[in-house]
Image (tube, rainbow, N blue to C red):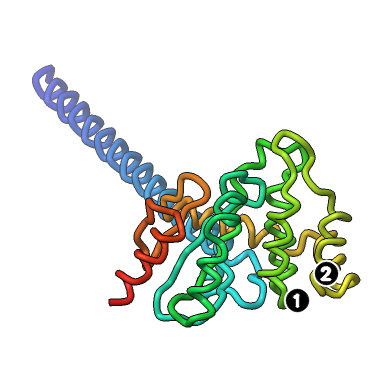
Amino acid sequence: MSSRKGQKDAARVVREQLAREKRRKRTLWTSVGAVVVLVIAGLIGWSVYSSQRADDFTAPKGTNDAGTGVVIGSGPVTIDLYEDYLCPACKQFQEISGATIDQLVSEGKAKVVFHPVAILNRYSTTEYSTRSSAASGCAAEGGKFKEFTDALFERQPPEGGPGLSDDELIDIGAGVGLNRDDFGSCVSDGTFKPWTQHVTEDASKARVTGTPTIRVDGKDVADRSPEGIKAAVEAAGK
């Protein structure tokens, strides 16, 4: 009897161990499945979020297909200019080489894609880089981007201060021929601030690390003098 009882007890222990093992495996696979579901859900959520961020802006008139810059001219060679309206070196570049770029555009040798990035907000107490870039979007919407850009560099405020006020930006816009009411509402409402963020984020993805950055058909131009830019455009056009 004791032998039979021992066999029964041993069998019961084995059955219990097998049952526990099955429960442990079920629990394990349930946990794994839950993790997989969470990972997939996270990836889907990030994808949706990223697509929403990418589409959560309205580009002004006259921009390229990607909405990352305002196009000036229609020549066969593309000059990409990445500039911040608060950047002193950008103002200097415009003073030295701006006329050369204008000439290349007017002669039909090149087109310019101007990317008004906002990377110097830390040097302004009012995020002037963002405000001025967004205002340039308003100017593009009104068909006066180039005129407004030239005027902004002429009136460039010093770093470390508030920069030009919105009212001053509106006065400059009206001064280059923009409708004061329409342009003023656009500036005051910050209509193109999301666009400015898009332009700036795209510049970062394009490995733009400072301003001004000049690229001719996608290649950085180290010599930013009038001669250097002409040479780069001529070489790209061959």
Tell me whether the residue at label 1 lies in contact with that at label 2, contact meaning CB atoms closer than 8 angstroms: yes
Residue 31 placement: quadrant: top left
Taking depth in this image into account, of 130 and 26 the one nearest to the observer is 130
Calculate the distance from the C-alpha at mark 1 to the C-alpha at mark 2: 7 Å
Location of mark 2 (residue)? 183
Query: Given the image, on which type of amino acid does mark 2 rest?
Result: Phe
Query: Given the image, on which type of amino acid does mark 1 rest?
Result: Gly
Residue 83 placement: quadrant: bottom right
The residue sitting at 66% across, 42% down in the picture is 121
Residue 99 placement: quadrant: bottom right
- Helix, strand or loop at mark 2: helix
**For the residue carrying disc 1, how many other residues have a C-alpha within 10 Å: few (<14), some (14-19), or many (20+)?**
some
21 left or right, relative to 66: left
The residue sitting at 89% across, 70% down in the picture is 180
Location of mark 1 (residue)? 142
Taking depth in this image into account, of 199 and 110 the one nearest to the observer is 110
124 left or right, relative to 51: right
- Helix, strand or loop at mark 1: loop
The residue sitting at 25% across, 31% down in the picture is 16
Residue closest to the far left:
3
The residue sitting at 53% across, 74% down in the picture is 64
Taking depth in this image into account, of 214 and 22 the one nearest to the observer is 214
Q: Is residue 232 above or below residue 201?
A: below
Give how far across and how far down residue 80 sits, in percent. 47, 64
Give how far across and how far down residue 19 sits, in percent. 26, 37
